[in-house]
């Protein structure tokens, strides 16, 4: 379905190239972005073009980030992924020329604006944060992997659907926790995400480079990839999409993992590697260890994957971004003078008071979401220590940090799906813009 006549941007975005490609894959999104950004096969940061080819293998976060983004504007990703000034100080070495075209994105990063001020404050605060929090995160996610595999084997051995549910819930928690690691520099724990049948490499594009940078806009692949079944942006929608999605959505949640695997397989451009086979490791182990027939093992594999998919999707789609009071592209936007990227992120998110403060719930349920969007490379375990400086900076600029209950956000998600009239009032005016 062509959404170009249905979805309109209030931020001034042109309709993204290849947005309506049937696969909605990360690689297609990057291909369209390459067309739209006009970065001349280089890397654009603000209004300058850089040649980072010689830096690919030197990049501390891994070569994949540089390789994927060639030919695109990486301003938002560069700013949000580098708290230290070291990266910015390296840029002149790779400078090629000034860009001949204006940026395709309206967001600003003024030196004394909200986001850069907050980033400097957070960078200083990190020196006081206990490193034990990061260790606790590793222990938690490793324990979830053990829990998933153990319940899987027990479910097959005892042919227990109940134990299968426990395994599926463990898988849902594990997948949410693994999301912490594909935002960061390369680590083997990012591959825990692949046990879900989804791909951490695909999500590094669809989630990290798209959703996190252009949240709730026409450039957000997590918005476009669920269309036309779920239409979160306000505008023209038929009755079935507005209200039928409340019912058929549950079935889509249940097959998210499997359909994601099929989509990734269909979009592969290279030979299958070991990570593509990782989801089937529990199936193979159960067949070898329990001596149960393969069809029994396969049944429980599908049952557990379905439970995990349902659990993960319910949490993910109701976590932070879909509520009528949250900005969605099409709503009246802030004036251009207030389109600081950090302010925009807070306009497009709400946090849940039910889970804030719990290391386990924050890690497994996309918690502390505002801080996570602002500083995605920081471990979830340390975000709780950053609230004092975060709230102080918000108060200084008059930026609102909003809290709701999980139930309010679930109800809000359904209201947003039914919403056709955009918000006419822009977000709360800032005290200072930098």
Image (cartoon, grey):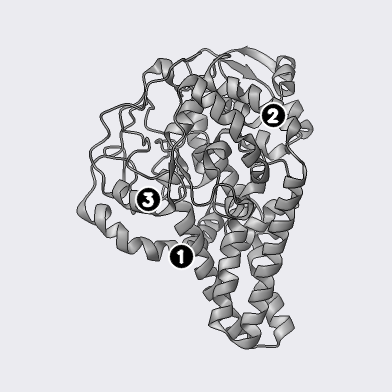
In this view, which residue lies farthest toward the left? 239
Residue depicted at 37% across the width and 38% down the height? 326
* Front residue (pair 366, 40): 366
* Front residue (pair 268, 228): 228
Using the image, tell me which numbered label, if any, was put on residue 224: none
Tag 1 and tag 2, C-beta contact below 8 Å: no
Using the image, tell me which numbered label, if any, was put on residue 125: 2
Using the image, tell me which numbered label, if any, was put on residue 255: 1
* Front residue (pair 345, 201): 345
Tag 3 and tag 1, C-beta contact below 8 Å: no
Q: CA distance from mark 3 to mark 1?
A: 25 Å
Label 2 Cα neighbours within 10 Å, binned few <14 / some 14-19 / many ≥20: some
Label 3 Cα neighbours within 10 Å, binned few <14 / some 14-19 / many ≥20: few
Residue 284 x %, y %:
69, 75
Tag 2's secondary structure?
Answer: helix
Residue depicted at 48% across the width and 56% down the height? 315
Tag 3's secondary structure?
Answer: helix
Residue depicted at 50% across the width and 47% down the height? 25
- Which circle's residue, 2 or 3, is located before the other in the chain? 2
Q: Quadrant of residue 85?
A: top right
Q: Which residue is mark 3?
A: 408
């Amino acid at each position: 379905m062509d959404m170009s006549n249905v979805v309109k941007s209030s931020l001034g975005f042109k309709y993204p190239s290849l947005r309506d490609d049937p696969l909605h894959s990360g690689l297609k999104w990057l291909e369209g972005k390459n067309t739209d950004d006009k970065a001349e096969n280089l890397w654009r940061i603000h209004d300058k073009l850089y040649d980072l080819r010689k830096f690919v293998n030197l990049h501390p976060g891994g070569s994949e980030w540089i390789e994927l983004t060639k030919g695109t504007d990486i301003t938002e990703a560069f700013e949000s992924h580098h708290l230290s000034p070291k990266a910015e100080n390296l840029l002149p070495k790779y400078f090629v020329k000034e860009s001949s075209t204006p940026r395709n994105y309206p967001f600003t990063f003024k030196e004394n604006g909200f986001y850069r001020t907050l980033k400097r404050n957070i960078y200083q605060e990190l020196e006081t944060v206990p490193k034990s929090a990061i260790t606790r995160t590793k222990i938690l996610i490793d324990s979830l992997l053990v829990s998933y595999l153990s319940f899987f084997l027990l479910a097959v051995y005892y042919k227990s659907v109940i134990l299968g549910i426990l395994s599926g819930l463990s898988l849902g928690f594990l997948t949410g926790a693994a999301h912490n690691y594909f935002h960061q520099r390369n680590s083997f724990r990012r591959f825990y995400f692949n046990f879900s049948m989804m791909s951490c490499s695909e999500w590094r594009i669809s989630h990290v480079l798209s959703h996190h940078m252009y949240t709730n806009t026409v450039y957000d692949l997590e918005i476009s990839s669920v269309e036309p079944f779920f239409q979160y942006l306000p505008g023209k929608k038929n009755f079935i999409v507005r209200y039928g999605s409340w019912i058929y959505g549950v079935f889509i949640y249940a097959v998210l993992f499997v359909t994601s695997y099929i989509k990734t397989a269909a979009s592969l451009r290279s030979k299958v590697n070991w990570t593509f086979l990782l989801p089937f490791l529990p199936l193979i182990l159960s067949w070898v260890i329990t001596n149960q027939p393969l069809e029994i093992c396969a049944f429980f594999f599908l049952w557990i994957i379905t439970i995990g998919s349902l659990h993960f999707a319910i949490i993910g789609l109701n976590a932070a971004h879909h509520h009528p009071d949250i900005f969605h592209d099409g709503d009246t936007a802030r004036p251009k003078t207030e389109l600081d990227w950090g302010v925009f992120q807070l306009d497009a998110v709400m946090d849940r008071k039910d889970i804030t403060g719990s290391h386990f719930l924050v890690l497994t349920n996309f918690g502390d979401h505002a801080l996570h969007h602002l500083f995605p490379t920081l471990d979830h375990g340390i975000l709780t220590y950053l609230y004092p400086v975060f709230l102080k900076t918000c108060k200084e600029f008059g930026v609102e940090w909003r809290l709701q209950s999980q139930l309010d956000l679930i109800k809000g998600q359904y209201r947003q799906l039914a919403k056709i009239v955009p918000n006419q009032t822009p977000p709360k005016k800032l005290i200072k813009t930098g």
